[in-house]
């Protein structure tokens, strides 16, 4: 049974650790900068459950830090994939946009000066720009590679 003195001691330690963590920084908690007093609060909370229990507070604290690091690394990885486009769909979209832009640039150059490309390769520009842009990404890449030189 939990006594009132245990509750008061627990509340005092909890207030102290919350204050200390505030000094360290709550944002730093995710990076593993955690007050050592959390261990004391944990021990006190477990004492009310079982008096004869061995001291597992250090194991608990290590587990908390590992869980925080794992969580923050996964959070960072997720944000990194979104920001840098490492998700497959984002990568495919970026790749498709890149080859489409290259086709548009080539057609604009060709429209300004169709003699910039050898006569033997001019047949590649007889198809409409929209027709080439309607191809799959692989089809557009093949069209681009069929040009003997990049303009």
Image: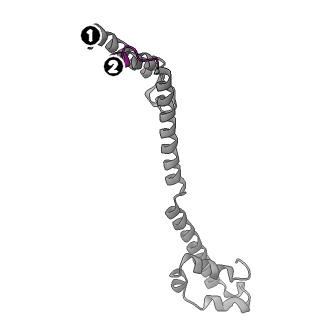
User: Which residue is found at the position 69% from the left and 82% from the top?
Assistant: 147
Count of numbered labels shown in the rendering:
2
Secondary element at tag 1:
loop
Reply yes or no: does residue 105 show up in magenta.
Answer: no
**Residue 48 percent across, percent down from the top left:** 32, 16
**Residue 137 percent across, percent down from the top left:** 56, 75
State which quarter of the image contains the N terminus: top left
Q: Is residue 97 above or below residue 40?
A: below
User: Which residue is found at the position 50% from the left and 82% from the top?
Assistant: 134
Q: Which residue is mark 2?
A: 49
Count neighbours of disc 1 (C-alpha within 10 A) and say few if under 14, some if 14 to 19, many if 20 or more. few
**Residue 120 percent across, percent down from the top left:** 73, 92
Q: Is residue 89 above or below residue 130?
A: above
Reply yes or no: does residue 53 show up in magenta.
Answer: yes
In the picture, measured across the screen, residue 16 lies left or right of residue 90, that is: left
Q: Which residue is mark 1?
A: 3
Residue lying furthest top in this view? 5
User: Which residue is found at the position 73% from the left and 82% from the top?
Assistant: 148
In the picture, measured across the screen, residue 48 lies left or right of residue 30, that is: left
Q: Quadrant of residue 116?
A: bottom right
Count neighbours of disc 2 (C-alpha within 10 A) and say few if under 14, some if 14 to 19, many if 20 or more. few
Q: Quadrant of residue 84?
A: bottom right
Q: Which residues are magenta?
A: 46-55
State which quarter of the image contains the C terminus: bottom right
User: Which residue is found at the position 37% from the left and 14% from the top?
Assistant: 51
Identify the mark nearer the N-term, 1 or 2: 1
Nearest-to-viewer mark from 1 and 2: 2
Q: Main secondary structure of the magenta part?
A: loop
Q: CA distance from mark 1 to mark 2?
A: 12 Å
**Residue 17 percent across, percent down from the top left:** 41, 17
């Amino acid at each position: 049974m939990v006594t009132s003195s245990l509750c008061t001691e627990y509340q005092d330690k909890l207030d102290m650790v919350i204050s200390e963590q505030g000094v360290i920084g709550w944002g730093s908690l995710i990076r593993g900068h955690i007050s050592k007093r959390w261990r004391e609060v944990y021990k006190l909370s477990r004492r009310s459950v079982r008096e004869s229990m061995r001291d597992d507070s250090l194991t608990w604290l290590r587990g908390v830090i590992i869980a925080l690091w794992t969580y923050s690394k996964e959070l960072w990885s997720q944000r990194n994939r979104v920001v840098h486009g490492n998700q497959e769909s984002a990568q495919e979209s970026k790749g498709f946009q890149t080859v489409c832009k290259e086709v548009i640039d080539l057609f604009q150059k060709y429209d300004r000066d169709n003699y910039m490309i050898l006569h033997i390769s001019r047949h590649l520009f007889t198809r409409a720009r929209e027709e080439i842009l309607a191809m799959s990404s692989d089809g557009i890449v093949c069209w681009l590679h069929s040009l003997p030189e990049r303009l």
